[in-house]
Amino acid sequence: MASPTQKHDWRYRLHEIIFEADTPGGKAFDVMLIVSILMSIAVVMLESVETVRQQVGHELRLLEWGFTILFSIEYLLRIVTIRKPHRYIISFYGLVDLIAILPTYLSLLFPGGQYLLVIRILRILRVFRVLRLVLYLREGEVILQALRGSRRKITVFLFAVVTLVTIIGSLMYMIEGSENGFTSIPAGIYWAVVTLTTVGYGDIAPVTILGKFLATVVMIMGYSIIAVPTGIVTAEVAQVYKFIDKQSTQACRECSLEGHAKDATYCKYCGAKL
Amino acid sequence: MASPTQKHDWRYRLHEIIFEADTPGGKAFDVMLIVSILMSIAVVMLESVETVRQQVGHELRLLEWGFTILFSIEYLLRIVTIRKPHRYIISFYGLVDLIAILPTYLSLLFPGGQYLLVIRILRILRVFRVLRLVLYLREGEVILQALRGSRRKITVFLFAVVTLVTIIGSLMYMIEGSENGFTSIPAGIYWAVVTLTTVGYGDIAPVTILGKFLATVVMIMGYSIIAVPTGIVTAEVAQVYKFIDKQSTQACRECSLEGHAKDATYCKYCGAKL
Amino acid sequence: MASPTQKHDWRYRLHEIIFEADTPGGKAFDVMLIVSILMSIAVVMLESVETVRQQVGHELRLLEWGFTILFSIEYLLRIVTIRKPHRYIISFYGLVDLIAILPTYLSLLFPGGQYLLVIRILRILRVFRVLRLVLYLREGEVILQALRGSRRKITVFLFAVVTLVTIIGSLMYMIEGSENGFTSIPAGIYWAVVTLTTVGYGDIAPVTILGKFLATVVMIMGYSIIAVPTGIVTAEVAQVYKFIDKQSTQACRECSLEGHAKDATYCKYCGAKL
Amino acid sequence: MASPTQKHDWRYRLHEIIFEADTPGGKAFDVMLIVSILMSIAVVMLESVETVRQQVGHELRLLEWGFTILFSIEYLLRIVTIRKPHRYIISFYGLVDLIAILPTYLSLLFPGGQYLLVIRILRILRVFRVLRLVLYLREGEVILQALRGSRRKITVFLFAVVTLVTIIGSLMYMIEGSENGFTSIPAGIYWAVVTLTTVGYGDIAPVTILGKFLATVVMIMGYSIIAVPTGIVTAEVAQVYKFIDKQSTQACRECSLEGHAKDATYCKYCGAKL
């Protein structure tokens, strides 16, 4: 794809270092990038801790600006060295790269906005490309495929859950009332979600006997309800597995029967060589 | 189904707008209806928040009456325009439509009853028909079929759970006693349900060593118990999938019955070649 | 099995009423029995509620004694009318029937023992026999078979969980210490169980940063661990299903191929009548 | 494997007692060992309870030292009697045996270190060998195989969860702030993990309306997310089952290779008739 003249082009060499990971320079760049990202996230997290902020808050802010300027330069270099900049800018990675530098600049206008910098963690996704974890990506693909396959069913299920918690939440608001923490219907819905998902904070809990009875029914119901998405996703994962299994099947040239194991050399029905 | 004279009947045209969704008028009506339902639910929710009620409570009550009168007119029009009104009235949608307007009138007699209006959320189910989300309905059908298939097993399972929590709850009441929050056997059962379903509010928690030990056993037991409904539903979903897979759409040319396996060469009902 | 002379025997007739459910008398007896059991459990539960006990405690105690004497007479009649009393006495139902009357008598010696009467709920299992819910029993059999099949795996799994919570609990005791609620290693283990099973009461929760970090790791680990028993039980349920499916398979007498649907009349491979 | 002269060797006999479990002496030794381990763990646990420590703390410390010296002697004997000591020392059991005695000695330098003795519970794993619970080990093997098969998918999943909780935790820190318990981003992440895993202690819970709304979304999301690892593990367990099912124990008479499918007529490796 690259003409000989391009080989000596600085843009071409920079592009190879920044975008590719198969040259020593490219790999070193990517490793350094991931370390920088992790460190910059650590800086943001530390800054949010008040005792740390009081002691070294100024130094952390400086570090933060350092990382942001570094990533800004990297972002500009990416735009400069790529052949079709607009395609990179509107790509997933391009948007993440932009969002990862914006919060620091925004924090000049809106103090506190720098905490959005944790979005930088999305940049870590590059790690899969750098460390050649292609196998892992393929496995992640199985999960995504199963989720995609169950998308519609999960949507219908969530719709049913939203309907259910609205009705349960309103009933609880009427039964328990403001004096027992159920201050409004939305508060009742919040309680219903906390209960049905078995999170159970305990910040709002039924007090009256009728309320406790309804809560008991909701919890036991939630027991069966939680089984539904699990059942759907499991069945989908199994479908994806079956599909992968089937794909590798070959037919015997003699008896044309299928269903041979992947390691088979001879047809198990007629003995002919596969 | 409609005779030429009916075409010009106002009832016929109203019926088409109110009940069907394939004419522009019918679609517009349904979209407006769904927006009205969502807004009326929002009004009820807002009214339940005390700070909002104190400021604009009167206006919200007026809006509520407005929506109710609107829905009442719609309900009457539905009865007037349909050919067999009694069938609509006792149908699922008919009952929901009625229940969705009653609470406001009831609130004249029983203040607070208007919160039951959230039941209007059930009317939203029409959204699937309006937006032609037939695909979603079919997916929901898979869930329903799996739940129907596992209905009896889930019933037996819930029966076992109720027996279990009754015994555990009584034991805990005897072990912990009123001074540790287990004020009665029903309270103990409430705790047992909260624990076994892994909700764990923490409003009642064991205090004595023996109580904590029993709680530990119950929790680890609950670990395995929660697996049972999930296992049942998952297996049912897989059954439904397998059934869909196997069922070829091919009908026999002799007896015109469907439901043949995909690898079938002969009709399994009459023996004719497919 | 009954000789003509036995037909007129009072023992024989009583046996039929008490043990069988296919005569009108037997059915009426069983229904009355179940109602009595449910009422006696309700009495025990009500008695445990302090406000109720203070008002009608005496009456409830009398009712309790009434039910116990009734069940005692029934127990004696069962022994008298059955042909092999010792087999009934040591059977599951016989033991439950005995345990269901003992607590009232024991409560004379140990006050509070009467709450053990809730064990009477086990007698409700007869309901399946009375209401001819044979179908439900068969479904329950599927659950039991799946649990039996996964028994060993669940045991190994629980062994691993016990090992894990012991180690985690000790670590948390050392990290957090008595001042943060982790008063001893058993307390730490209790916390570990509460956390790993996702119950999460919140009566003990980590306070130090290291403790919270370990808790985070434990929780995310628990996420994957909870998947194991579910996976095992689900796979077992699927096995049971497959077994039931296979059992009903018949082979064609012409081509001797199997795999026909249950409703098939003709072989799907060669068209011969099955 | 043992020459006649070795038979009378004390080392050989000791080796048989300590390492094997098929002689009466060996079995007695193993049973005693397991009892000692359980007792020594009980001693450590009891010592951690303050009321017990104040009363018999001194005696428990003596017992602890007694067990440690006993296990130290056992450890030395194992090294002396085995033919290749270095292989034992670096084996899993060898390391566990060493770790199981170190904490007592370390507690001389670092008080409190003796609580690490609970690691001795890992030695209990020998119980499976002693009680000839080979069947259980094979079942455990199924679990391990399923976990190994889903290792990569679980890793990708956990990576996604870590990314998710970081972003959610930061958002909640910005929404709720220090005054509502979300004192820093790590605290927010801790809350996100507690919520997403449905543990829900309630030590930190959202207070603002926006925070509660986000929490509701996170919880309902967690509902679907918890389904993913379960789906993966279940599908893997099913795969392992299928593999065991398919694998017939039949070996080819020509090439003596195993692993043929049950319906195979010809060896899939060399084509010979089975």
Image (cartoon, coloured by chain):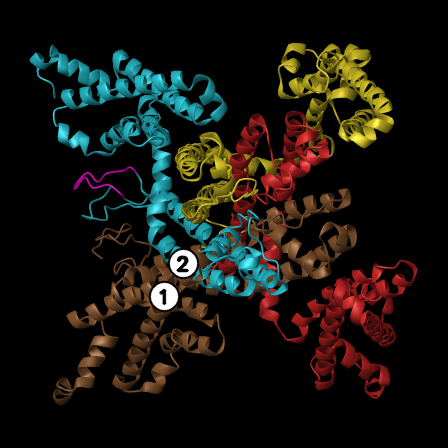
Chain colours: A brown, B red, C yellow, D cyan
Amino acid carrying mark 1 in the image: Leu
Mark 2 burial class by Cα count in 10 Å: few <14, some 14-19, many 20+: few
Above or below residue D64? Residue B246 is below
Q: Does the magenta stretch include residue D38?
A: no
Q: What span is colored magenta in the figure?
A: D249-259
Q: Nearer the viewer, residue D15 or D108?
A: D108
How far separated are the C-alphas under marks 2 and 1?
9 Å
Look at mark 2 in the image and give the residue it sits on. Answer: A52
Read off the chain for label 2.
Answer: A
Q: Can residue A79 be seen in this view?
A: yes
Q: Give the residue type that dot 2 points to.
A: Val
Q: Residue A9 at x, y = what percent?
A: 16, 87
Q: Position of residue A263 (x, y in %)?
A: 24, 52
When the figure is inspected, residue B181 is found, relative to residue D161, above or below; the finding is above
**Secondary structure found at label 2:** helix
Q: Mark 1 lies on which chain?
A: A
A3 to D19, vertically: above or below? below
Work out whether residue B146 or residue C189 is closer to the camera in this orientation and state it. C189
Q: Quadrant of the N terminus of chain D?
A: top left
| The disc label shown at residue A60, or none | 1
Would you say the residues marked 2 and 1 are in contact, meaning their CB atoms lie under 8 Å apart?
yes
User: Of label 2 and label 1, which has the lower sequence position?
Assistant: 2
- In the image, residue C258 sits, relative to residue D75, either above or below, namely below
Left or right, residue D163 beside residue D90: right
* Residue C135 appears in the picture as rendered: no
